[in-house]
Amino acid sequence: MGVIYILMAASAVVAITFLVLFIRSVKEGQFDDTWSPSRRMLIDDDPVEKKSNQKEGK
Amino acid sequence: MLNAGTVVLADGATAPAITSCIHCGLDCPPNPPRIGELNFCCNGCRTVYQILTDNGLQRFYTIDESPGVRPPDEPSATYAALDQAEVRQRVVDFSNGSITRVTFRIPAMHCAACVWLLENLYRLIPGVGRSEANFPRKEVSIFMENDTVSLSDLATRLASLGYPPELKLDRLSGMTDTTGHRRLLLQLGVAGFAFGNVMLLSFPSYLGLDPVRDAGLMHFFGIVSLLLSIPVLFFSAQDFFRGAWIGLRQRYLTIDFPLALGIGALFVQSVVDILRQAGEGYLDSFTGLVFLLLCGRWFQRRTYDALSFDRDYRSYFPLSVTRRQNGLDETAALTELKPGDRIVVRHGEIIPADGIIISGEGQLDYSFVTGESAPVAVQSGEYVYAGGRQTGGVIEVDLVKDVSQSYLTSLWNNEAFRKPREQELQNLTNKAGRWFTAAVVVIAAVTATYWFFADPSMIARTFSAVLIVACPCALALAAPFTFSAAQRHLGKVGLFLRSPTVLEAMGKADEVIFDKTGTLTNGPTGTAEFEGPPLSEQESSWILALTKHSSHPTSRAIAVAATHPSKSAFPETCITKFEEVAGAGIRGEFEGHEIKIGSSHWCGVSAPEGHGTWVLIDGKVRGRFLVGQNERPGLEKLIATIQRRGWITTLLSGDRPAAATRFREVFGEKSVLRFEQSPHDKLNYVRTRQSANHRVVMIGDGLNDAGALRQSDSGIAVSDNVTLFSPACDAILAGHAFSRIPEFLHYARASLVVLKIAFCLSLLYNVTGIAFAASGKLSPLVSAILMPLSSFTVISFSLLGAAFAAKRTGVNKSWA
C-alpha cells in the first residue's frame, strides 16, 4: 500500500499547481470582466487600417 | 475622404431604414441631415459619423445595428476642472510625468461596437495610447501622453462622440469593489479545492476501509484532510466568524452566529477525533458547508455593476464652476466655494448653491428640486436655489449659502442619509436565526443534561453533534438563492434591484407612494393641443419653424404638435427678425407675416382663462396651445390594480395642483394626494407613515425625491435611461416597465412566501438531524449525507419557487 503515499504526493502537486494558477488569475483580474473579452475576440482587426495608414502616412 | 467613407459603409452589413438614424437608430425628423444616401436624426450624429469615417473607423457601424449614441445637443458640462492639479490627482489612476492612465465611467457604453470604438480611441484622438473597456462596469481605462492631450480635452472629445464620462469625486476609484469581488472568488476557490480533495480522502472510510488494519492509512488521510481544511477555516470561513462577532458585540444575533457555532463545532470535533485517532472527523461536511455557504454569498453578490444606486446631488452638479474674483474669471472646484463668492452660470449649467442673482436674467428649470419642469423667470436681485438649471443667457450669482447647506442639498444632511440602513439586520433570515439560536442552545443543554445522567462520556460528543447538525446552513442559503433568482427574473423585465434583500422590504410593504412629474407623467414635456380654428398648412409650418428655434420645453412640445404628418418640408430659412423674450415668448416674421407665440400677458390676450400658449398672426389671435402632462400609458389600470390587491396608494407631487382633478380621478377618493411638496415634505410624509406602522414603497425619479426614496423601506427610481439618471435608491425601474409595477409588487410578496416555505424545509432537515445527534448516533457519514442534501433541496426549491412565482405573477413568462 506504500505506493498510495507516492500517488497522493503526485496528485497533491497537480492539485496545488491548479490552485496556485487559479489564485494568480484571480489576482490578475481575469474574472473581473467576463463580458467584454468574449465579444472582443469576435471583432476582426480592421482590414481598412493598412490602406488608411498608407494614405495618412502614419 | 468623406465620400470614400460613405461608400465603404454603404456596402456594410445592413441597409439603413429610411426613417431611422444610421448612427443612433432614433427616428429622423422630416428633412433630416444627410450624408449622401444616409439619414441622421441630428447634426450631432452626422458629425460623429463623419469623424469616425474620416478616421477609418467605419467598422463601428458593421458590428451592431445603429450602435451609436446621440451626442448631446449642447455640451452639458465643462471638463475644464479636470486640468486642475487637485481634481486631476483624484481622477487619474497613475501618472509618471509623460504617461497618464485614467479610468472613466462611461454610462452610455451599451454594445460591442461601443467597446470596440472605445478601444480604438488611439486612432481618433492624438496622444491616446492603449485603452481598455470593462463592459459590465461601463468603464474605460485610457493611457495618454501628457504632452499631447490634456485630461479635459480627452473628456470633451469623448463627450462629443456621445460618450460623456461620468465623474464622481467622492468615490472615484472602484477598486474596493473589485477587491471584495476577488476576495470572495478566492475564498470560494480555496473552499472548493479543499472540499473536493477532502471528500476524496473521506470516501475510503465510508466505503469500508478497515479501521483496525488500515489505522495508519486512515490517520494519514485524516492529517492530510486537516491540513487542507485549515485554510478553509482561517481564510474562507472568516467572514462568518467576523459577522458573528460583530453581531455579538452589538448585542444582535444574526444568522452568522449559529453558522459560526456549527462550523466551529464541526472543525473542533474533527480535530479532536483525528488527533486522538477516534474517527475520520467531519471535515468533508465542514469544507462542503463552507463551500455551499460561499456559493450562496456569491450568488447573492451578483449585482448590476453598470448601474449606480447611490448617486447624490454631487453626481448631478458640475465638478467646478466659474468664479469671478476682482473681475477675473477662474475655475473653482465645488468644494472651494464659500458664501460671498460670485459665480458665473451659463446656459445649461446648474446653480451649485443658493444665492442671489446679481446680473442677467434667469430662466431656471427647477425640475431637479421641485419636479416642476416649466422654467421660472428670475430677475436680478432675486433668490435662486441650488439645483436650478439656467436655460437662458449668462447670469452672475452671489452665493449666500454653502453647497452642502443649500435648500436641496441640505436634504443630505438629514438623518435619513446618515444612519446606516437597518434592513440587513432586521431581515427574515436573521430573525429566524435568532429563534434558531435560542432553540439550538436549549436543545444542546437538554441533551447534555440527559447524557450527564445516562452516560457522562457522551456529553461532549452529543453536545457538539447537536451544534453541528443544527447549523442553519440550508436556512442561510434559502434567502440568497430565492431573492437572487427573483432579482434576476425582475432584471430581465426592467426592474433592477440594488441587492436581493431589497425584495424582502418590497414584499412586506403595504403602501405605495408615487411622485408625479417624471414618474406618473413621462418626461418634462407633454403633448400640445391646439385650440381654435384649425391651422392651415402654411400656418403650422410657420409655427413649426419658429418653435424649432427655441429650446424651451413648451416650444418643443408645440413643435412636435405642429409637425404635419404628411408634409415634411417647411420654410427653414425665411424667418426674419427672430426674437426670443425670456419668460414670455417668441416672435418672428415670414414673408411679411408676423408670428407671435407666447404667454397671454405678452401676447396681450385678456381671456378669462388666460393660461396656455397663445398664437398671434399679424396681431390677430389665432388660438392657443395647451401643453398637457404626458401620462404614462395605462396609468388608471395600474393604480386600480395596485389598490385592488390591497396596497394603499398615495401621490406626492412637487407640482402645483393644476392636475389635481385628473389625479383624483385616477387615484379614487380614498387616496391621499398632496401637491406642492418640497423634498423635505416628501421625506417627512414617508417618515410619518412609517411611524404609523406602514411599510412604504416610494416610487420617484428626481433628486427632489431622493430623501423620500432613502427614507422609505424600498425606494424605486424610475428612469427612462437606467444607466444615466437616477438618484440614490434601492431599485431602478426602466421607464418601459412602468406599467408592470403591480406585477412586480405582487412578485415581491410571492417570493416572500417561497422563502418561508424554504425555511420550513430547511428546519425539517435540522429537526431530523437533531434527532440523530441527541441520541448520539450522528456518524460522519450521516452528517456528510444530510447536510449537502438539505442544502441542495433548499437551493433547488428556492430557484424553482422563484421561477414558478415569476410565471404565476406574470413577471417572467419563460422558466429560464
Image (tube, helix red, strand yellow):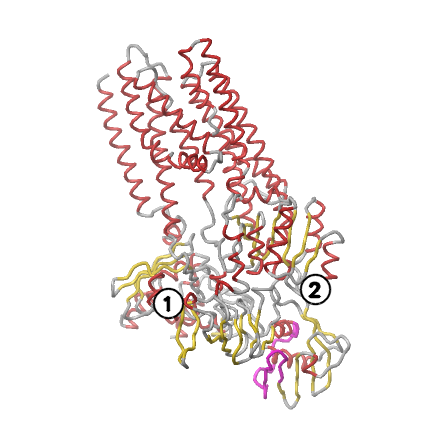
* Percent position of residue A46, x then y: 34, 62
The picture quadrant where one finds residue B87 is bottom left
Q: Relative to residue B506, is residue B531 depicted above or below?
A: below
Query: Which residue does the numbered mark 1 point to in the structure image?
Result: B82
Residues rendered magenta in the picture = B561-587
Q: CA distance from mark 2 to mark 1?
A: 43 Å
Q: Is residue B586 left or right of residue B133?
A: right
The N terminus of chain B sits in image quarter = bottom left
Residue B617 circle label: none
Name, please, the residue furthest toward the right.
B608
Residue B793 inside the magenta-drawn segment: no
* Foreground of the two, B620 or B68: B620
- Quadrant in the picture for residue B54: bottom left
Q: Chain of mark 2?
A: B
Mark sitting earlier along the chain (2/1): 1
x, y percent for residue B229: 33, 29
What amino acid type should be assigned to the residue bearing mark 2? Pro
Q: Nearer the viewer, residue B84 or A6?
A: B84
Would you place residue B811 above or below residue B152 in this image? above
Specify few, some or many for label 1: CA neighbours under 10 Å numbering under 14, 14-19, or 20 or more: many
Q: Secondary structure at mark 2?
A: helix
Comparing B423 with B517, the one in front is: B423
Query: Residue at the location (66% across, 68% down)?
Result: B527
Residue B52 visible, this orientation: no
Residue B70 percent coordinates (x, y): 49, 67
Name the residue furthest top: B454
Which mark identifies residue B657? 2
Q: Is any atom of residue B88 visible in this view?
A: yes
Kindly state the secondary structure of the residue where label 1 is placed: helix
- Callout 2 and callout 1 share a chain: yes
Q: Is label 2 in contact with label 1 (beta carbons under 8 Å)? A: no
Chain identifier of the residue bearing label 1 in the image = B
